[in-house]
Amino acid sequence: MILAEHVLRYLTIAVAGYALLTGCLFLGQRRLLYLPDRTMPDPVLAGLTDMAPAQLATDDGLSLLAWYAPARDPDKPILVYLHGNAGHIGYRGSKVRAYLDSGFGVLLVSWRGYGGNSGDPTEQGLYRDGRAAMAFLDQAGVSPERIVLYGESLGTGVAVQLASETRFGAIILEAPYTTIPAVAARHYWYIPANYLVRDKFDSLSKIGGIETPLLILHGERDNIIPVEFGRELFAAAREPKAWRGFPEAGHNDLYDFGAANAVLEFLFQLSSLSERDGQGDITAPKDPVSLP
């Protein structure tokens, strides 16, 4: 009887501890998912003095900072950079430099709650922010066919959502996931993440309906969003699509291993295909795009 009472007491403590841990993770999940630097980014420190500040107006009343540089050639695309869950747009200067130097336009989008912006990030909030970027370009006279959506990590979910709503010139996903609950379940295997995660960013259910030419970049040593998530998303996507894996890269260092060159190769290939078709944009080629 005494032994049974001790076992019951330990089980009660264990269950209570597990419930407390699960509750804390549930209540604090957005602090784990979103890691903003709330300070105002400086384009000088970012090496982006050739980009001008712009304000994106969301449909729920926020005004968000963005940095914008139009394309040197009006026929060249605008790359809309949707960054990941940490920092702010000032940390992405070195990543977009190659595209600016190649004559492409760039719109660096800063999320609500990031980089001096008001508001707090949520899944639906970030979708609103992405749509505000599209509205800004529409007012600037940029058609969707000239827009290349570039999603980085968390931002890939926003890119996929936007591409499921509108057909753009191309979509590029760096270190994408299938869903946030799937990634959470990998890292927090001891809790029922599929039932607890609020912001799901379910790219897997959307990617098959997107007809936009797609490039996925993924580091094969990525221990934050393991490469199998990117491969699963790629398998579910339609043609035309291209995959670039980087055997030595992790989650944050793909540009140290030639990611910019892979993106430029993809974009120039699409541009040359559309020019041969007599078009002035980078719409989907008739044959699947492949990269070596």
Image (spheres, grey):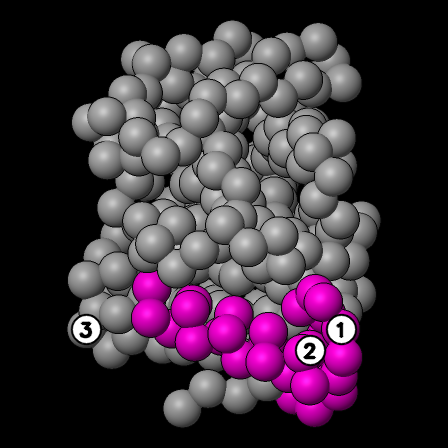
Q: Which of 269 and 186 is in front in this view?
A: 269
- Of badges 3 and 2, the one in the foreground is 2
Residue 62 image point, x, y percent:
64, 11
Q: Is mark 2 on a helix, strand or loop?
A: helix
Contact, mark 3 vs mark 1 (Cβ under 8 Å): no
| Residue 205 x %, y % | 72, 59
Which class describes the residues within 10 Å of circle 2: few (<14), some (14-19), or many (20+)? some
Label 1: how many Cα within 10 Å (few below 14, some 14–19, many 20+): few
Tag 2 near tag 1, CB within 8 Å: yes
Does residue 268 show up magenta in the picture?
A: yes
Mark number displayed over residue 279: 1
**Side of 235 relative to 280 (left or right):** left
Q: Identify residue for label 2.
A: 274
Q: In which quarter of the image is residue 126?
A: top right
Q: Which amino acid does label 3 sit on?
A: Glu
Q: Distance between the residues labelled 3 and 1?
A: 38 Å
Identify residue type, mark 1.
Gln
Is 195 one of the magenta-colored residues?
no
Q: Mark 3 points at which residue?
A: 248
Q: Is residue 256 left or right of residue 287?
A: left
Stretch of the chain drawn in magenta: 260-288
Q: Judging from the image, what secondary structure is the residue with disc 3 in? A: loop
In three-dimensional space, the C-alpha distance between marks 3 and 2, rounded to whole angstroms, equals 33 Å
Q: What's under tag 2, amino acid-wise?
A: Ser
Q: Which residue is drawn at 49% across and 33% down?
A: 68
The residue under the point 30% across, 34% down is 48
Front position in the image: 91 or 99: 99
Dot 3 or dot 2, earlier in sequence: 3
Which of 155/213 is in front?
213
> Compared with residue 95, is residue 266 higher up or lower down, i.e. above or below?
below
Q: Distance between the residues labelled 2 and 1?
A: 5 Å
